[in-house]
C-alpha cells in the first residue's frame, strides 16, 4: 500500500466522553499512528508514532512524526501526551523525537522493563534500560485524563509480554493484538510472546460494548482491498474477524495462529528497532568518533 503513505482518516467523537480520533498511515511498515483528542478541550495524545527508518542505509528521518504534529496544528489541538503501546518490533518509535520537539512526557507499559531484561541478553547490552527514557510506566488498571476524557490502561499481553491498550469512552487503541477483521490477529512468536495470552487479551477487548471502536496497530492490505483500514467495532470483530470471530474457540485460534507464525520471517527492522525502542526511541549512544552504531546479533534467530 505504498501509494497511501500518510493517508489520514478521521473518526469523529460520538458524544460525551468519546474522543475524536485521527489515524495516519505509515506505508513502509503498515503502521497506523494515532491522535486522540477531547472534543471539548482540544487536549490530545499521540499514540504509536513512527520514526522513519531505511534498513538498507540505516538512516532515520522524522517525516511521519512531522505529519502527526502538522495534523495537531491544523486541527487546533493541544498535544499533552506521547504514548506507546509496546516496544515495537516492526518500526522505530518517534517518542524521543516528539519529546525533544514538544517537551511533553512520554509513556509506555511497566512491563517494558521485563522486555528489556529479555533483550539485554540477545544484544549483550547490560545497560539497555528503559527507566531513564520514559516519564511514565503504566500498570494494568491505571488511568489518566486528556482534557475531559478519562483514559484507562489495560494489560494486553501475547504479542509481547508487556503490551498495553488504551481505552477512552467508546474508543480502544489495541495495538498489535487484533488486525482489521479481514486480517485477523497479530503474531505471538517473538521472544516473550504467547499465543494463549494473546487469545485472552483479545477476549477481554471483545468483552467491551459492541459499539466500541477498536483501532489496530497495522494494516498490510488483504486480497482485493487496497485502501488501508484500521477501525472496526467490537461487534464487527466478533462477527467477521477471520481468527477470532463467528464462534472460533481457544484451541482453534491457538492452532491457526501458531501455524501462521511458523511461516513468518522476522520484520526487516526488528533487530534495529528493539534496541532503539527499549530506549524510548533514542538511537544507540555515539562512540568515540561521534557516530552512532546499531548492534545486531548474528545467528540468534
Image (spheres, helix red, strand yellow):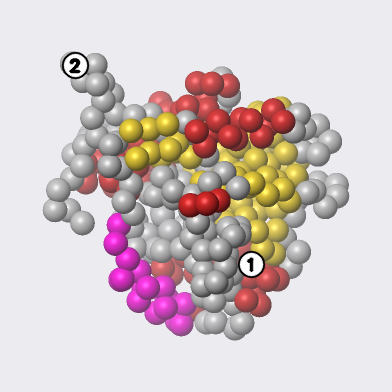
Residue at 18%, 16% in the rendered image: 288
Residue situated in front as seen by the camera: 258 or 161: 258
Determine the secondary structure under disc 2.
loop
Residue 206 numbered mark, or none? 1
What residue occupies the far front of the structure in this picture? 3
Q: Is residue 30 left or right of residue 79?
A: left
Instruction: Determine crowd level at label 2: few under 14, some 14-19, many 20+ residues with C-alpha closer than 10 A.
Output: few
Q: Chief secondary structure of the magenta span?
A: helix
Vertically, is 5 above or below 198? Answer: above
Q: Residue 87, percent across and down?
A: 42, 44
What residue occupies the far left of the structure in this picture? 299
Determine the secondary structure under disc 1.
loop
Residue at 38%, 29% in the rendered image: 282
Q: Is residue 136 among what the camera can see? A: no
Q: Residue 296, percent across and down?
A: 20, 42
Q: Is residue 294 among what the camera can see? A: yes
Of pointers 1 and 2, the one earlier in the residue sequence: 1
Write down the region rendered in magenta. Answer: 251-266
Residue situated in front as seen by the camera: 58 or 267: 58
Residue at 48%, 52% in the rendered image: 2
Q: Which residue, given by chain and number where applicable, does mark 2 sit on?
A: 289
Q: Residue 144, percent across and down?
A: 67, 37
Amino acid at each position: 500500500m505504498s501509494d497511501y503513505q500518510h493517508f489520514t482518516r478521521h473518526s469523529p467523537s460520538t458524544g460525551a466522553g468519546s474522543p475524536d480520533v485521527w489515524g495516519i498511515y505509515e506505508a513502509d511498515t503498515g503502521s497506523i499512528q494515532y491522535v486522540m483528542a477531547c472534543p471539548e478541550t482540544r487536549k490530545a495524545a499521540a499514540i504509536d508514532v513512527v520514526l522513519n527508518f531505511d534498513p538498507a542505509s540505516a538512516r532515520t528521518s522524522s517525516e511521519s512524526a512531522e505529519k502527526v504534529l502538522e495534523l495537531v496544528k491544523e486541527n487546533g489541538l493541544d498535544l499533552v501526551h506521547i504514548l506507546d503501546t509496546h516496544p515495537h518490533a516492526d518500526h522505530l518509535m518517534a517518542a524521543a523525537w516528539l519529546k525533544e520537539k514538544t517537551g511533553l512526557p512520554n509513556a509506555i507499559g511497566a512491563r517494558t522493563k521485563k522486555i528489556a531484561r529479555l533483550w539485554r541478553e540477545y544484544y549483550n547490552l547490560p545497560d539497555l534500560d528503559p527507566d531513564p527514557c520514559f516519564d511514565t510506566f503504566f500498570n494494568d488498571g491505571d488511568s489518566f485524563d486528556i482534557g475531559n476524557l478519562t483514559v484507562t490502561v489495560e494489560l494486553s499481553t501475547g504479542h509481547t509480554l508487556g503490551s498495553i491498550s488504551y481505552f477512552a469512552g467508546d474508543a480502544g487503541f489495541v495495538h498489535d493484538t487484533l488486525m482489521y477483521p479481514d486480517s485477523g490477529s497479530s503474531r505471538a512468536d517473538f521472544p516473550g510472546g504467547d499465543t494463549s495470552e494473546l487469545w485472552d487479551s483479545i477476549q477481554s477487548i471483545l468483552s467491551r460494548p459492541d459499539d466500541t471502536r477498536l483501532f489496530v496497530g497495522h494494516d498490510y492490505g488483504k486480497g482485493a482491498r487496497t485502501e488501508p483500514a484500521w477501525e472496526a467495532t467490537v461487534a464487527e470483530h466478533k462477527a467477521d474477524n477471520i481468527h477470532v470471530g463467528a464462534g472460533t474457540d481457544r484451541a482453534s485460534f491457538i492452532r491457526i495462529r501458531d501455524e501462521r507464525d511458523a511461516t513468518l520471517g522476522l520484520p526487516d527492522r526488528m533487530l534495529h528497532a528493539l534496541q532503539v525502542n527499549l530506549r524510548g526511541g533514542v538511537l544507540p549512544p555515539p562512540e568515540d568518533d561521534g557516530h552512532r552504531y546499531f548492534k545486531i546479533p548474528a545467528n540468534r534467530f
